[in-house]
């Protein structure tokens, strides 16, 4: 199991990826780029263009062999606890497995699976700061985990949010997973968080585990959190009319998750499309959970939304890359100058009915991942979890 921290996962001085067959930007406004070569320097994208115009002297060289280059995938909804271990499934190495599903960044929706999670204000603040510090210094396989997400509990005051922000906490865990569940109190605390630059996500739908509660459209609208977490339920979804109202009456991000109601996810996508609101769609797995660990959860969502939601595959990929990066204020997720040099190289799975990568995803098949690159460093080569890719990229020079 690969385990890297920022101290060991150092960007290479220069990296060139050439012979790219298809370059997906992650940007809904221009999802396919007309280029076949990308240059990265010190972990950032320096140039995008054609091989003849980009100097690869002295660089690490990757021959994409005509495969597809896309931004690394972002899982907008995970529940980490300690290192690369999840007590929900008593499983080690789950984050490293997600790397082999193309996931290079994760957003914590709360470290609520921590055994004996403290619910007093001092304890919850301490746990959030600990998680933020720990995952800033520990990156399994190179995956960047944005953690330290406290859930709201009664007794919190504005000064607590100021203290959390000063300590480096940038997000709340799912609103509604703690003792604060009413819309008016949620709204007040979300407002305090926003005042100090802390982003918020709200639980949506029925209880996820014993002890949690229903959060319906009225509470979601009253709270006005930045992200409507698992709008398709985690697992139990709201009625269709409530989902449609949330899409129509809120301007906040619409998060569709793997561990939710698939039909409700497709309804959310269709409604957002009709409203011309696709930039609001982001994707997560809502895992680890009682249903398990899903290393290919984001890829499965892409195939689901593209094949049954009638969305071009290059657009669906934007949901898990550029859309999430923009909403979550991340520097990854887009292939553009000065963005993080964090990529996934993939191709159609062997023997897929789809004749190209995009057509295979639109047919409902998962792509085969040939290489994952984080901050200009090769973090994984042929995936141990996806179906085998038709063609694999090659690391030519280091």
Image (spheres, rainbow, N blue to C red):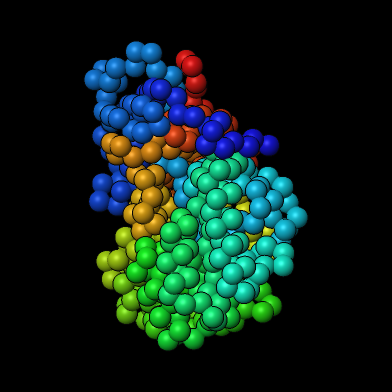
Spot occupied by residue 234 in the image (x, y as percentages of width and height): 57, 70
Q: Is residue 233 above or below residue 115?
A: below
Residue 10 appears in view = yes
Residue in the foreground of this view, choosing between 269 and 86: 86
**Left or right: where 327 falls relative to 50:** right
Residue 356 appears in view = no
Q: How many marks?
A: 0
Res 139 quadrant in image: top right
Residue in the foreground of this view, choosing between 219 and 390: 219
Which residue is painted at 47% across and 57% down in the image?
167
Residue farthest to the right, as pictured: 90
Res 5 quadrant in image: top right
Spot occupied by residue 121 in the image (x, y as percentages of width and height): 57, 73
Residue in the foreground of this view, choosing between 111 and 69: 111
Which residue is painted at 45% across and 80% down in the image?
186
**Left or right: where 356 falls relative to 36:** right
Which residue is painted at 31% across and 72% down in the image?
251
**Left or right: where 208 falls relative to 156:** right
Quadrant of the snapshot with the N terminus = top right
Which residue is painted at 55% across and 81% down in the image?
154
Spot occupied by residue 97 in the image (x, y as percentages of width and height): 63, 44
Res 113 quadrant in image: bottom right
Spot occupied by residue 54 in the image (x, y as percentages of width and height): 27, 20
């Amino acid at each position: 199991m690969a385990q890297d921290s920022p101290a060991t996962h150092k960007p290479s001085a220069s990296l060139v990826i050439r012979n790219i067959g298809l370059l997906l930007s992650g940007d809904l406004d221009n999802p396919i780029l007309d280029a076949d070569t990308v240059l990265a320097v010190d972990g950032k994208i320096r140039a995008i263009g054609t091989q003849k115009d980009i100097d690869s002297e002295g660089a690490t060289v990757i021959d994409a062999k005509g495969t597809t280059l896309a931004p690394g995938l972002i899982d907008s909804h995970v529940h980490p606890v300690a290192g690369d271990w999840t007590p929900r499934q008593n499983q080690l190495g789950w984050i490293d497995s997600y790397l082999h599903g193309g996931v290079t960044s994760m957003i914590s929706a709360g470290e609520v699976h921590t055994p004996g999670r403290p619910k007093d204000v001092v304890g919850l603040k301490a746990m959030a700061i600990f998680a933020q510090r720990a995952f800033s210094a520990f990156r399994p396989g190179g995956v960047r985990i944005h953690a330290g997400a406290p859930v709201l509990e009664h007794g919190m005051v504005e000064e607590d949010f100021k203290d959390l922000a000063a300590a480096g906490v940038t997000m709340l865990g799912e609103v509604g997973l703690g003792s604060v569940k009413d819309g008016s109190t949620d709204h007040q605390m979300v407002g305090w968080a926003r005042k100090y630059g802390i982003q918020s996500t709200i639980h949506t739908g029925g209880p996820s585990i014993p002890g949690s509660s229903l959060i319906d459209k009225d509470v979601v609208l009253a709270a006005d959190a930045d992200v409507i977490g698992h709008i398709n339920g985690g697992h139990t979804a709201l009625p269709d009319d409530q989902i449609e109202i949330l899409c129509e009456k809120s301007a906040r991000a619409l998060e569709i998750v793997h561990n939710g109601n698939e039909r409700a996810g497709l309804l959310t996508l269709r409604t957002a499309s009709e409203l011309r609101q696709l930039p609001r769609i982001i994707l997560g797995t809502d895992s680890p959970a009682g249903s398990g660990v899903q290393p290919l959860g984001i890829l499965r969502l892409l195939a689901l939304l593209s094949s049954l939601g009638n969305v071009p595959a290059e657009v669906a990929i934007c949901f898990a890359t550029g859309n999430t990066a923009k909403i979550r204020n991340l520097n990854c997720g887009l292939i553009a100058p000065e963005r993080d040099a964090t990529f996934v190289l993939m191709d159609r799975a062997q023997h897929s009915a789809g004749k190209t990568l995009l057509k295979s995803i639109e047919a409902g098949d998962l792509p085969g991942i040939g290489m994952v690159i984080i901050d200009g460093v090769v973090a994984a080569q042929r995936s141990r979890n996806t179906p085998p890719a038709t063609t694999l990229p090659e690391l030519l020079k280091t």
